[in-house]
Image: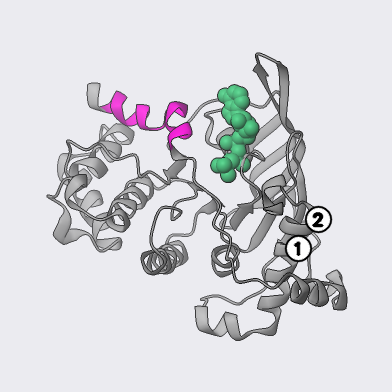
């Protein structure tokens, strides 16, 4: 029971302030070129309008959601009137400047935070608290350092499936460690493995529960570029094989264009909202080189950059 409580503590909102990352948009962008491209394109060509979908298709429904935090200076409205519907099995990336409320929004889906106004539904049911149908992967991995890789995943499986037979639980853990290529490392402690491996453990732990919604809060933000690309590809493969709805926060537009079906672009806070939603049209399975050769790639990338750096520039961007 004690260990199960520890697993649930991993999902505690107190973890969240520990995972703040810095912005790392690609620095090699020529603003004039972007503006030229933007001005020469009709946004309709970029297929930016949210697509209508039927209610029964929705895995996640965020309806007129506002979040107000009490602060010593008075109420602080982080998000105001946010609406988003996500289809089952859809891969959504959320982008926006630091502090605009991305984590707050996804915390209301995971159940760590509750809306001040409005509602969040997952598979038609209002979200009231965290649950195993919505697993979260954090940037800082949130592994228990005194447990092995195997035990970290086992802890979660055991907490969610206490009545399954021991052999079955161990087999689930083994299958998911194999899925992320960590069979050889199963007896190592988190301090004995790299950052990329730690994040693989964290992804294996989340998927071992078979969540309906996987929430990734800047999962690759702390990794080097090569490891990050490897993990993006692994994540896509796993998602192709075990389709669940994915909501992922990123600061990396290229990452979003490679992974997502749609890119949700948030305006700046306070009272942030969803500014635009970009449909990402590249066919799946995706090949990084092939999509980067697609002329639409740069149109979409530049459109997102213009949104962040011109239309909703942050004070820090002026530097
Ligand atoms: N519990 C809280 N009480 C008061 N203010 C809060 C609380 N949690 C978050 N905030 C504030 O809400 C705003 C949005 O925070 P949030 O973490 O959702 O932003 P974010 O877009 O995810 O940022 P980042 O990209 O830096 O992770 C920030 O100004 C933050 O300081």
Of the image marks 2 and 1, the number of the one nearer the N terminus: 1
Q: Do labels 2 and 1 touch, CB within 8 Å?
A: yes
Q: Which mark is residue 155?
A: none
Residue occupied by mark 1: 306
Crowding near the residue tagged with mark 2, few <14, some 14–19, many ≥20 C-alpha atoms within 10 Å: few
Along the viewing direction, whichever of 62 and 133 lies nearer the viewer:
62
Residue 191 visible in the snapshot:
yes
Label 2 lies in ligand 1 vicinity (Cβ under 8 Å): no
Residue 295 as seen in the image, left or right of residue 230: right
Which percent across, then down, holds residue 306? Answer: 76, 63
Q: Nearer the viewer, residue 255 or 55?
A: 255
Mark 2–mark 1 Cα distance, whole angstroms, equals 6 Å
Colour scheme used in the picture? one colour
Is residue 131 in view? Answer: no
User: Judging from the image, what secondary structure is the residue with disc 2 in?
Assistant: helix
Residue 119 percent location from the top left of the image: 70, 31
Q: Position of residue 102 (x, y in %)?
A: 62, 42
Residue neighbourhood size for the residue with mark 1, other residues' Cα within 10 Å, grouped as few (<14), some (14–19), many (≥20):
some
Left or right, 169 with respect to 9, comes to left
Figure quadrant of residue 308: bottom right
Which residue is found at the position 69% from the left and 84% from the top?
295
Magenta-drawn segment: 4-18
* Residue 287, above or below 98: below
Q: How many marks?
A: 2
Determine the residue positioned at 34% across, 52% down.
199
**Residue 311's disc number:** 2
Magenta: predominant secondary structure element? helix
Between 305 and 138, the one nearer to me in the picture = 305
Instruction: Please give the name of the residue rendered at 32% of the width and 58% of the height, measured from the top-left corner.
Output: 196
Q: Report if residue 16 lies within the magenta region.
A: yes
């Amino acid at each position: 029971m004690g260990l199960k409580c520890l697993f649930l503590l991993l999902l505690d909102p107190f973890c969240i302030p520990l995972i703040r990352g810095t912005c790392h948009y690609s620095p090699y962008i020529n603003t004039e070129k972007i503006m030229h491209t933007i001005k020469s394109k009709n946004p309709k060509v970029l297929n930016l309008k949210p697509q209508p979908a039927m209610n029964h298709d929705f895995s996640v429904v965020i309806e007129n959601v506002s979040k107000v935090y009490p602060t010593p200076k008075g109420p602080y409205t982080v998000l105001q009137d946010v609406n988003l519907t996500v289809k089952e099995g859809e891969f959504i990336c959320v982008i926006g400047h630091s502090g605009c409320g991305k984590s707050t929004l996804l915390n209301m889906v995971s159940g760590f935070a509750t809306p001040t106004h409005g509602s969040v539904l997952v598979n038609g049911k209002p979200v009231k608290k965290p649950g195993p149908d919505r697993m979260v992967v954090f940037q800082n991995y949130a592994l228990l350092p005194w447990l092995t890789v195997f035990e970290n995943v086992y802890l979660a499986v055991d907490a969610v499936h206490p009545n399954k037979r021991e052999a079955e639980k161990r087999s689930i853990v083994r299958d998911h460690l194999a899925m992320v290529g960590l069979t050889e490392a199963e007896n190592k402690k988190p301090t004995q493995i790299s950052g990329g491996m730690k994040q693989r453990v964290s992804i294996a732990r989340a998927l071992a529960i078979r969540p309906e919604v996987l929430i990734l809060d800047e999962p690759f933000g702390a990794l080097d570029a090569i490891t990050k690309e490897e993990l993006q590809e692994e994540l896509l493969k796993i998602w192709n094989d075990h389709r669940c709805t994915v909501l992922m926060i990123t600061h990396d537009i290229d990452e979003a264009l490679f992974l997502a079906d749609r890119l949700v672009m948030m305006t700046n806070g306070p009272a942030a909202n969803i500014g635009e939603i970009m449909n990402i049209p590249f066919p799946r399975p995706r090949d990084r080189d092939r999509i980067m050769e697609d002329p639409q790639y740069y149109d979409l990338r530049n459109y997102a950059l213009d949104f962040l750096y011109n239309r909703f520039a942050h004070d820090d961007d002026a530097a």
